[in-house]
Amino acid sequence: MRILFISNYNAWERIEDGVMPSHHLFGVNEMIDHFETPDSAILKKQFGGGKIDFVKVANPSKLELLKLYVKCFNYDVVYDVLTAVSKQFGVLNKFHLFCPRLVTVFHHPPFDKMMKYAKSDCSVFFTEELMKEAQKCIHDGRQVVYNPWYPEKLWYDKNKQTLNSKKTYDFLDNGKTSRNHNLFIRSMRLMPNRRAVIVTDKKHIPTEYKEGENVDLFFQDKPNDLTMLQLCLNTKVMVIPLEENKKKLGPIGATSYMDAIALGMPVVTNKKAAFAKEIADNGIGCLFDLNEESLVKALSQSLDKYDDLHDEMVSFSGSHSISNYTELLSLYLFK
């Protein structure tokens, strides 16, 4: 079997270099026996011993899409992990003009137009709620799968051995997408004896930030997982303060959530976050409404109950890893 893996960033190169955890390949890294070239690998015999090629697709032109479309006919399966091409190729697939099996990971609703006008042979969702939302719009026999995404713990365990794990901060807010950093800063002013750090870049400094207060800024222009690992090790609690949104949220903040799970960090996030129910059901963090009073209460609770929340997260991490995702992935990828 030949598989074409499509993403909008070249995680496979960074993972092969050891500077990024393997969950950024959405389950396929655990299937790989070895790389033949930087963009091509051989699968383990238990997964058929076939070949998987990797291609980065980001804002493609019509000509680039046409070339990729022709290329796809050399493969049995196209695995689109960030919905980079499934809008276009899904339409062709709906009218039987796309030869390989199209497997797509869908992240952010609304899904109605994608489900109505395009067709992936297998549609994958990280939460049951998102899957059920999409199923409302599906009226054919396509396969729909709930497969929760979890971290590769081995990468964290290996790399943290050489790093300093002294807790300098109480809270870390290390995401940039749809984050309400200003609400977090205002809430921290009501907790003057606590310290926090926010990851940002010089173009997106929070307007509420004031130098010399109890919130530091850590500037990072490009993602660096090893740097983030060090910050996580220096912090007790992961904070994911998502912006207010009346629509149903996709898995925004999931990368920060992966860091927290792998390292046993309790999580503080909005009640509307895609993984909020999982956090509440497993006692691995605290949830808040989008106001300062509620956030301060959640932050305080996360520290008051830190030992218990940490222990629950460590236990949760032990049974939730990328290997669980890979096991289910193998069932629908090779169908």
Image (cartoon, rainbow, N blue to C red):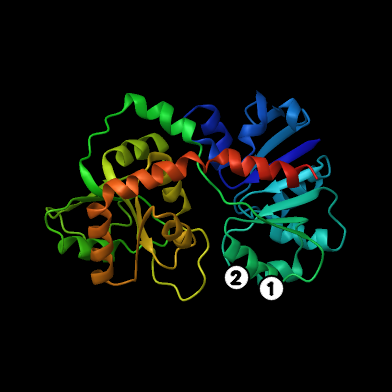
From the image, tell me which residue sits under label 2.
110
Whether residue 235 appears in this view of the structure is yes
**Quarter of image, res 328:** top right
Mark 1 crowdedness (10 Å alpha carbons): few <14, some 14-19, many ≥20? few
Q: Which residue is mark 1?
A: 136
Query: Which numbered disc, 2 or 1, marks the residue that appears first in the sequence?
Result: 2
Residue type at numbered disc 1: Lys
Label 1 SS:
loop
Q: Is the residue 179 above or below the residue 236 in the image?
A: below
Say whether residue 271 is left or right of residue 308. Answer: right
Image position of 132 with respect to 219: above or below: below
Whether residue 20 is visible: no
Label of residue 18 in the image: none
Q: Amino acid at mark 2?
A: Pro
Q: Position of residue 78 (x, y in %)?
A: 74, 46
Q: Residue placed at 22% from the left, 64% from the top?
A: 187
Say which residue appears at 33% left-offset and 24% top-offset: 162
- Looking at the rendered image, the quarter that the C terminus falls into is top right
Q: Is residue 260 above or below residue 301?
A: above
Q: Is residue 86 left or right of residue 304?
A: right
Question: What percent of the width, then of the height, locates residue 143?
Answer: 76, 58
Left or right side of 187 for 130: right
Quarter containing the N terminus: top right
Of residues 178 and 240, the one nearer the viewer is 240
